[in-house]
Structures are given as C-alpha cells and as structure tokens.
Image (cartoon, rainbow, N blue to C red):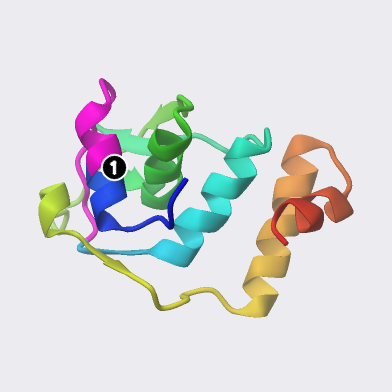
Amino acid sequence: MDKINKEIILKAIGKSDFILKSTHKKLCLPIINRIYTKMMNGIKFDDIKVCDTLIIDGHHRYVSSLLANIKIDEAKSSKTSATIEYNWTDVEFVEEEWDTEDKIKRLNELDAEFNNIPLEKIIEITK
C-alpha cells in the first residue's frame, strides 16, 4: 500500500459496507499506520466502542481495519451530551506522532499479551 494518507483513508471508507461516524476531529497517521501494519500481520485487537453509528472509542483501530479489509468487532457504548459527530471529510489526519516511545512499548506489550505471542514478534512486525 502507498503511504497512508487522508485520500487513501477516505477511499477505504467510501468502499466499505461497514460505515461508522467519527466523534474525533483529528486522528494520528502514525498510530493508524502501526495498527494497520499489525493487523496485516495477523494481530487481533479489542473491540471498538460504538453508540448507534458513532465511534466512541477505537477510531484508529476502525480506520486501520478498513485499510486492512478486516472486520473489527464492536461493543455497545454510550455517548455524552458533549459527543460531536464529524464527517470523515472534515477529520484532520495529522503526521505528528501522538504516542511517546514508552506508550508505544506499553501498547506493544498489551498487543503481545492479548494475542498470546512473544513481544519480540510484535517488535519485529513494527520495524
């Protein structure tokens, strides 16, 4: 796949039969890329949290799953009065890295534990 960008993401969303709506105005491309890479290598992820057709938690996992053409499971959730719906064309996909090295390490540990595989395998996949 070409470098993941907004155009590629919007194209994947447009092709999908599994359309959910964003409640985030911004998403991080490096996070999407890491999750996508893991998904393409068979790594499973926890369910995304959804209220009706709104993503409450799991935006990066949702977008990554569309790019990888992998169905991710949903868990019912609730929204608050502060929940705002955004059209995907209005979402900003930023190149800035949001996660620290320590957070990436912790997420890799959690992914290894969730998938019952050695941490080294996760690290190898994401090199």
Front-most of residues 2 and 88? 2
Instruction: Specify the amino acid type for callout 1.
Output: Ile
| Boundaries of the magenta span | 11-24
Front-most of residues 21 and 94? 94
What percent of the width, then of the height, locates residue 61?
45, 45
Taking the magenta stretch, the answer to whether it contains residue 13 is yes
The dominant secondary structure in magenta is: loop
Front-most of residues 119 and 123? 123
Which residue is denoted by mark 1 in the rendering?
A: 55
Taking the magenta stretch, the answer to whether it contains residue 111 is no
Q: Residue at x 30, y 37 (%)?
A: 12
Q: Residue at x 70, y 48 (%)?
A: 111
Q: Give the residue at the far front of this rendering.
A: 2
Using residue 22 as the reference point, say whether residue 2 is left or right of it.
right
Q: Residue at x 22, y 48 (%)?
A: 22
Residue 52 shows in this picture:
no
What percent of the width, then of the height, locates residue 81?
12, 54
As drawn, 57 above or below 95 = above
Using residue 97 as the reference point, say whether residue 42 is left or right of it.
right
Residue 51 shows in this picture:
yes
As drawn, 92 above or below 63 = below
Q: Residue at x 44, y 28 (%)?
A: 69
